[in-house]
Image (cartoon, rainbow, N blue to C red):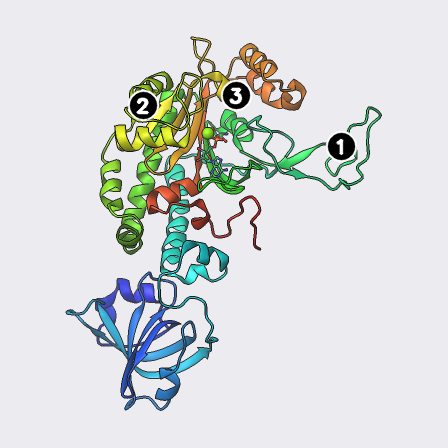
Amino acid sequence: DIQLRELFRNTEKYAGKEVVVRGWVRQNRNSNKFGFINLNDGTFFQPVQIVYEADKLDNFEEVAKAPLSSALLIKGTMLMTPDAKQPFEIHAEEVTMEADSAADYPLQNKRHSMEFLREIAHLRPRSNTFAAVFRVRSLVAYAIHKFFQERDFVYVHTPIITGSDAEGAGEMFQVTTLDMKNPPLTEDGKIDYSQDFFGKETNLTVSGQLEAEIFALAFRNVYTFGPTFRAENSNTARHASEFWMIEPEIAFADLDNDMQVAEDMVKYIINYVLENAPEEMEFFNKFVDKGLLDRLHHVVNSDFDRVPYTKAVEILQKADKEFQYPVEWGIDLQTEHERYLTEEVFKKPIFVTDYPKDIKAFYMRLNDDGKTVAACDMLVPDVGEIIGGSQREERMDVLQARMKEMGLNEKDYWWYLELRKYGGVKHAGYGLGFERMIMYVTGMSNIRDVLPFPRTPKTSEF
Ligand code: 4AD
Ligand code: MG
């Protein structure tokens, strides 16, 4: 049999010929003489139209009753239909039922709410919206690898179970084999992790950055691409407990170099998806986010502004808009602020740079003003922050002072400090939230709907 992608992409090769296809019924309409089936095998976004006639099939009755999501094998002739909506149809000569489907199939041919579809996460990849989302997700993953591999970055697999808190924010899921209802205790009454599986306290990683830095100082250009976990209890449309992150790390690079790579990468991803998923992108543009394609085309052809945090705060303070969260120097920018900057002021992605050190992680390089760090967040319309990055603090004494200030234990980071001792050149990197990038290119507005199996507080099927 021929897969539908092959058929749709090479119609002239198969026009007028006999073909065999298989797939699932997405729609079946008929009279007592003939009928039409929309059949999809999942390899192509659009279904193929099958025309069948009572005169030609011995099992016309059976085919006419083929329910939604039953699977059929069809032998027929492919005919071009230049005047119709679909480019061609297949006139069936033989139809075999490969799998029946029960009449209570939940995905009837109508618009379902995203909430309903989330409840049937095992069936939703068959709907148009999720067929488009998850193919684009796959393509974006490939585009990211392609981007970095073409630039000779080495792909590093950083650990998923780790003994260090990369962000120093304490939002980790613990991994333990101890009986936590009745844990062994040390003499001073603390949990005795020396008896735990790894002989110390371990967690699921929140970021592969610190380990990526190890490799950057050996290979110069590296990236990670893996799952990360955060036990932050933020029930928003942009936070998941399990999400994927891409983290390049570049030796001999400063913040400007870092931002250039980030900007090039985002444009590369958008171009790749526009080129390789035209049907899906057309669908998003029509049904999910009107104007999406125009906006993305504009983005790939523009330069992203770089706005120092202090300037961003001034812009927000001058805005003729009441924010729920008042703006003053030192605050962490909230989604409403990020959206105002990208949607009302700049109308495209921007970098906000040089944040106050007190709201950023311990590893970011302290600027000469002593108050801000060499950080860069990429903010985009509708989604907000999709990238967080920085130049790293390569000066041993400054790093030690920062860690002390933040109450981090040097012993836990001994190897990280040694990187500064042995050829610790300047270096920089960033983390792209994979799901937020998917939200941005598809126009989907909830992170739960770009994750195949979303995990958020209090919800976790599978
Ligand atoms: O800004 P973050 O916390 O930065 C880091 O983890 C650095 N170690 C990255 C680096 O410099 N190598 O996270 C990076 C990105 C955010 O910009 C956001 O897009 C995404 O990861 N992110 C989340 N995405 C979904 N759900 C969450 N709970 C997320 N937390 C962060
Ligand atoms: Mg961040």
Marked residue nearer the N-terminal end (1 or 2): 1
> Which x, y percent locates residue 104?
47, 73
Q: Give the secondary structure at mark 3.
A: loop
Residue 221 or 195: which is nearer the viewer? 195
Quote the CA–CA distance across marks 1 and 2: 45 Å
Q: Can you say which quadrant of the picture contains the C terminus?
A: bottom right
- Tag 2: amino acid: Arg
- Asked if ligand 1 lies within 8 A of label 1, the reply is no
Residue 146 or 109: which is nearer the viewer? 109
Marked residue nearer the N-terminal end (1 or 3): 1
- Tag 1: amino acid: Tyr
- Asked if ligand 1 lies within 8 A of label 3, the reply is yes
> Which x, y percent locates residue 152?
41, 35
List the single residue furthest toward the right. 187
- Tag 3: amino acid: Tyr
User: At 39% across and 40% down in the image, what residue appears?
Assistant: 437
Q: Is residue 425 visible?
A: no
Reading the image, the residue beneath label 1 is 193
Residue 97 or 251: which is nearer the viewer? 97
Left or right? Give the position of 175 relative to 434. Answer: right
User: At 44% across and 45% down in the image, what residue appears?
Assistant: 447
User: At 40% across and 20% down in the image, what residue appears?
Assistant: 254
Reading the image, the residue beneath label 3 is 363
Q: Nearer the viewer, mark 3 or mark 2?
A: 2
Mark linked to residue 298: none
Quote the CA–CA distance across marks 3 and 2: 21 Å
Marked residue nearer the N-terminal end (3 or 2): 2
- The local crowd at label 1, few if under 14, some if 14 to 19, many if 20 or more residues have their Cα within 10 Å, is some
